[in-house]
């Protein structure tokens, strides 16, 4: 069993390491003090069974770190361990894809309970907190159908958005204009029924995104949306 601890405070990493090894003596535990190093660890080795993530780290705004972690590694559950445990923070963390939330003030026993619950496929919340209601959230099947409605070019753009790329970076990587990227993102949001790129990432994070990509939807050239261009090889 493999765990990855992501926290920029050495003392908290040490405390979490102690809790993990006490509950799972044979576990392999890797540590990262930043999201970038965590992504490298997670991508370069065997899949992790659980990620323990702090929300408040240098260079990370709000829930962006959690959202990107879920987008990059959707099959690995994320247990948030944070000093911010206000009810609205806990609810939003769950909405953004966390499989559980543990306040940093908790002891080893509670953290162990949380890890076991999450590893068994459950959702762990602190005492007194309730899981946010599903009202307004789309069913997985419905969102998957919306995802399948995207063109290959739009799927390619969305895949880069899910990796945290900015419009300028996407344009450079795909060798297109930034205005083309913006147009595709607008169309992606319309088709998915979301109001922001962050919401698009959240809504699709738990779906079989790679499976849809493998259907051939991610291999097309990215061109501006609109009427099909005439084939330059055709004759009038």
Image (cartoon, rainbow, N blue to C red):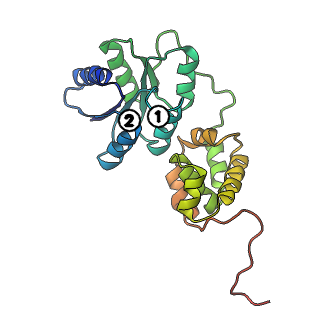
Left or right: where 102 falls relative to 162:
left
Q: Which mark is residue 99?
A: none
Query: Whole-percent x and y of residue 40?
Result: 35, 46
Residue 39 appears left or right of 176: left
Residue at image x 50%, y 53%? 210
| Residue at position x 31%, y 49% in the image | 44
Disc 2 element: loop
Quarter of the image containing the N terminus? top left
Q: Which residue is mark 2?
A: 34
Which quadrant: the C terminus? bottom right
From the viewer's side, name the closer residue of 208 and 29. Answer: 29
Disc 2 versus disc 1: nearer the observer: 1
CA gap, disc 2 and disc 1: 9 Å
Residue 29 visible, this orientation: yes
For residue 82, above or below residue 147: above
- Give the image location of residue 144, x and y in percent: 61, 47
Looking at the picture, tell me which residue is in the foreground, 195 or 128: 195
Extreme bottom residue here? Answer: 235
Could you say which is closer to the camera, residue 65 or residue 156?
65
Q: Disc 2, disc 1: CB below 8 Å?
A: yes
Residue ID at (63%, 50%): 147
Q: Is residue 145 above or below residue 94?
A: below
Q: Quadrant of residue 21?
A: top left
Question: Which percent across, then down, holds residue 66?
Answer: 48, 33
Q: Residue lying furthest right in this view?
A: 236
Left or right? Give the position of 42 relative to 86: left
Asked whether the viewer can see residue 156, the reply is no
Q: Residues within 10 Å of mark 1 (few under 14, many from 20)?
A: few
Q: Which residue is mark 1?
A: 59
Q: Is residue 9 left or right of residue 92?
A: left
């Amino acid at each position: 069993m493999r765990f990855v601890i992501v926290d920029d405070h050495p003392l908290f990493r040490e405390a979490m390491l102690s809790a993990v090894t006490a509950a799972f003596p044979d576990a392999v535990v890797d540590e990262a003090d930043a999201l970038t190093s965590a992504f490298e660890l997670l991508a370069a080795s065997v899949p992790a069974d659980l990620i323990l993530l702090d929300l408040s780290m240098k260079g990370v705004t709000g829930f962006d770190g959690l959202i990107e972690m879920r987008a990059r590694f959707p099959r690995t559950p994320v247990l948030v361990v944070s000093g911010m445990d206000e009810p609205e923070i806990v609810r939003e963390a769950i909405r953004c894809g966390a499989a559980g939330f543990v306040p940093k003030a908790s002891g080893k026993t509670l953290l162990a309970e949380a890890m076991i619950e999450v590893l068994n496929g459950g959702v762990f919340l602190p005492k007194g907190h309730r899981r946010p209601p599903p009202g307004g959230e789309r069913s997985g099947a419905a969102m998957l159908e919306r995802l399948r409605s995207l063109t290959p070019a739009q799927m390619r753009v969305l895949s880069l958005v899910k990796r945290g790329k900015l419009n300028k970076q996407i344009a450079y990587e795909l060798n297109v204009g930034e205005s083309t990227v913006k147009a595709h993102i607008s169309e992606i949001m319309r088709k998915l029924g979301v109001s922001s790129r962050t919401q698009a990432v959240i809504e699709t994070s738990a779906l079989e995104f790679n499976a849809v990509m493998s259907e051939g939807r991610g291999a097309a050239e990215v061109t501006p949306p609109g009427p099909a261009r005439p084939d330059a090889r055709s004759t009038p």
